[in-house]
């Protein structure tokens, strides 16, 4: 009976040990698979975020390019406008305006329809803002 009892206890101990070993291996495998699943989720989220940021960068580059093109076009228009005014008035007339008195300058430049303009003879700049209002005392 003692031998039988000892054998049964040994068998039960071996069975519990084997069950715990299997249970431990299953928990390790489950933890490994959970870690892999979390890694896949994290990588997926990272790729999504990266793609969104790259798309935002490309969008911003496009907007910046449009702004630059717009500014360039406006500058070209202003340069063309200025050249046509100088061509229409003539360099000599502009030179005479620059060397004339402030009241005459106000009248001449205002007559050209210029709203803001700066003319200088190298020593005395003439600022004409809003048709010279406030430039010459009344």
Image: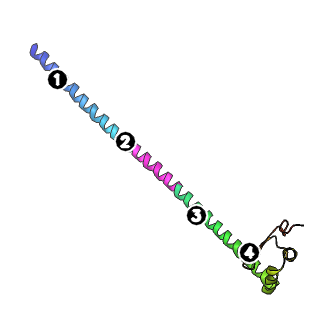
User: Residue drawn at (65%, 70%), measured in percent from left and top?
Assistant: 69
The answer to whether residue 138 is above or below residue 40 is below
Mark linked to residue 78: 4
User: Residue drawn at (70%, 73%), measured in percent from left and top?
Assistant: 75
Locate residue 81: give its quadrant.
Answer: bottom right
- Between circles 1 and 3, the one closer to the viewer is 3
**Residue 116 left/right relative to 59:** right
Q: Earlier in the sequence, mark 3 or mark 4?
A: 3
**Residue 37 left/right relative to 103:** left
Residue labelled with disc 1: 11
Give the Cα distance between marks 2 and 4.
64 Å
Residue labelled with disc 2: 35
- Is residue 54 in the magenta section? no
Q: Earlier in the sequence, mark 2 or mark 3?
A: 2
- Between circles 3 and 4, the one closer to the viewer is 4
Q: Image quadrant for the C terminus?
A: bottom right
Q: Which residues are magenta?
A: 37-52
The answer to whether residue 34 is above or below residue 62 is above
Q: Earlier in the sequence, mark 1 or mark 4?
A: 1
The answer to whether residue 75 is above or below residue 93 is above
Question: Mark 2 packing: few (<14 Cα in 10 Å), some, or many (20+)?
Answer: few
Q: Earlier in the sequence, mark 2 or mark 4?
A: 2
The answer to whether residue 37 is above or below residue 66 is above
Give the Cα distance between marks 1 and 2.
36 Å
Q: Secondary structure at mark 2?
A: helix
């Amino acid at each position: 009976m003692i031998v039988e009892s000892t054998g049964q206890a040994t068998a039960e101990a071996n069975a519990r040990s084997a069950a715990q070993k299997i249970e431990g291996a299953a928990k390790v495998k489950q933890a490994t698979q959970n870690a892999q699943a979390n890694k896949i989720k994290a990588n997926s989220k990272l790729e999504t975020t990266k793609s969104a940021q790259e798309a935002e960068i490309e969008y911003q580059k496009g907007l910046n390019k449009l702004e630059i093109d717009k500014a360039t076009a406006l500058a070209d228009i202003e340069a063309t406008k200025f050249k046509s005014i100088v061509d229409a008035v003539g360099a000599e007339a502009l030179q005479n305006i620059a060397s004339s008195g402030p009241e005459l300058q106000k009248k001449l430049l205002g007559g050209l329809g210029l709203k803001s303009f700066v003319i200088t003879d190298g020593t005395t700049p003439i600022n004409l803002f809003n048709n010279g209002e406030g430039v010459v005392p009344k």
